Image: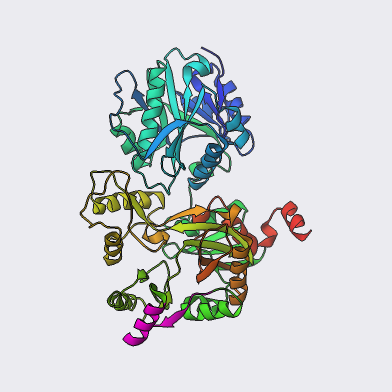
Amino acid sequence: MAQDCAVDCGWGRLLFAQTFTDPKALAEALREEGPDQRDIACYVNDPHVLIAQAPLELFLDPSHMFRLDLVGYEPSKRGHRAFHVRRLSNAHDIESISRIYSSRHMISARPDFYERHRDDETLVHLVAEDVRTHEIIGVVTGVDHVLAFNDPEKGSSLWCLAVDPQSRHPGVGETLVRRLAELFKERGALFMDLSVMHDNDLAIGLYEKLGFERRYTFSVKRRNYINERLFVGEPGVEGLNPYAKIIVDEARRRGIGVEVTDAEGGFFRLTHGGRSILCRESLSELTTGVAMSICDDKAVTRRAVAKAGVVTPEQIEAGDRKGLEEFLAKHGQVVVKPARGEQGRGITVGLDAIDDVEAAIEHAKAFCDRVVVEQMVEGEDLRLIVIDFKLVAAAIRRPAQVIGDGKSTVRELIEKQSRRREAATGGESSIPIDAQTERCVRKAGYAMDDVPPENAVVQVRKTANLHTGGTIHDVTGEVHHALVEAAVKCARAIDIPVCGVDLMVKSPRQPEYAFIECNERPGLANHEPQPTAERFIDLLFPLSMPAAVRRVGLG
């Protein structure tokens, strides 16, 4: 067996403690951790002895180790026609891995690391690819212990399992685990281990279902900013939603004081250098009451941005039936929405019958007594985040869809996907089963209790809001400059420092658009890996920016 084995995984090194005879040497190896890296000493049987070598620098990782016996492991006979698993092979795969890791708040290696290790047999990268869209929807990394350090136990291990939170396909994580286990079994490995956080009940449940059993060995890490929450906890952030937490985390990273005043409501106060600002998620005291009132009323918002030269669809306030009939005849399809509201509540899209329009108006009145009816504009829903009158992020928002498996009803598919979306978004996203969903399913040619064929795509909502199950796809690097200009015009017309501008577009790469609405409290957590929280804190506390960044900005 090789001595003092360390395997570079890109995000950090795996230090196999069973290959170190001297705990002091292992501690020294951990202390050599590189910047922005996360080294892990695994298979530590005497963690107290190791930590005693550097008690102020090392800590016991709060994770469990599980082992799958590959000798008795039986591969699953269930196939997945919607996606397949293969080895990492090209630049698109590498870019997708970084995107998925960012969405899961995981550390990604530099692209050239994956390029160098693409054909590495010691460090194995598998990806799950959607056969229809060719998108990468999951990734897993494995280490062959025999090749790494000539392991006499003939072991292997799994690290960094991640599934795209936008994926609509069930079983991606399970399939990646199984394919990696089957690969190592074919090589002659006797077992495959993995480490999982002690409170990740969903993952532990999956691993136990696959036959993994708990092993009582430990991992030790070095105290650094990446691991901070593991050894100091997260005081004061309990109950914060993802939209508030992403800002609080960035503020604390910069040394800005944080006081959570109402976790349930997302309220917190930030203090730095004698300045104190109260926020509710991405809404701060820098947004005036006038700007708030403009955004709050969709008819007023439309008038304000139209005066600034922004393209807007025609709109009327819901009134008599004759006026509604004429408006519907003119445009063919319309959208009904409360004059005030957020998160897609009360909005009905794609109405082409007057009875449906009137029913939608009554539904919208439950959220606001004033209702507007708007010309329906076909296309994709583009959200642009504008902070300090500069574009920070752009993303296409797509309505919820389910994919048939040939066995489940539409209702069951919706319920399963809702559970996955809730788990991926901290409970922020799910697909409601209501009249709008049923109407959309009918238009797709199904009833709620019908069983769609395998791989059939069924759109179940018209609106693309995250809260109703929509998915978000980053397009910041490819959005057309005309769309950016329109979003900035909207922000300046309302004079609002932080906003989310919604446009309907043919494509994010084309200039055609129609303005839909402006949100004064956009969810910054929805746009990672773009630096939305960083730019928000820059706006609030410009002196908290690193000096080098400030000099560039001034230049």
Residue 221 position within the rendered picture, expressed as x and y whole percent measured from the top left: 53, 33
In front here: 443 or 103? 443
Q: Is residue 190 visible?
A: yes
Asked if residue 508 is positioned above or below residue 168 in the image, the reply reads below
In front here: 425 or 42? 425
Q: Residue furthest left?
A: 449
Give me the residue at 32% from left, 44% from top. 455
Asked if residue 157 is positioned above or below residue 387 in the image, the reply reads above
Name the quadrant containing residue 437. Answer: bottom left
Scheme of colours in the image: rainbow
- Describe residue 489's horizontal placement relative to residue 376 as left or right: right
In front here: 200 or 344? 344
Q: Residue furthest right?
A: 555
Name the quadrant containing residue 213. Answer: top left
In front here: 453 or 364? 453
What span is in magenta?
312-330
Q: Tell me, yes or no, whether the highlighted magenta stretch contains residue 328.
A: yes
Residue 464 position within the rendered picture, expressed as x and y whole percent measured from the top left: 42, 61
Residue 454 position within the rendered picture, expressed as x and y whole percent measured from the top left: 29, 43
Q: Is residue 387 visible?
A: no
Asked if residue 454 is positioned above or below residue 546 in the image, the reply reads above
Q: Tell me, yes or no, whether the highlighted magenta stretch contains residue 4.
A: no
Residue 512 position within the rendered picture, expressed as x and y whole percent measured from the top left: 56, 65
**Quadrant containing the C terminus in the rendered view:** bottom right
Asked if residue 492 is positioned above or below residue 254 in the image, the reply reads below
Total count of labels: 0
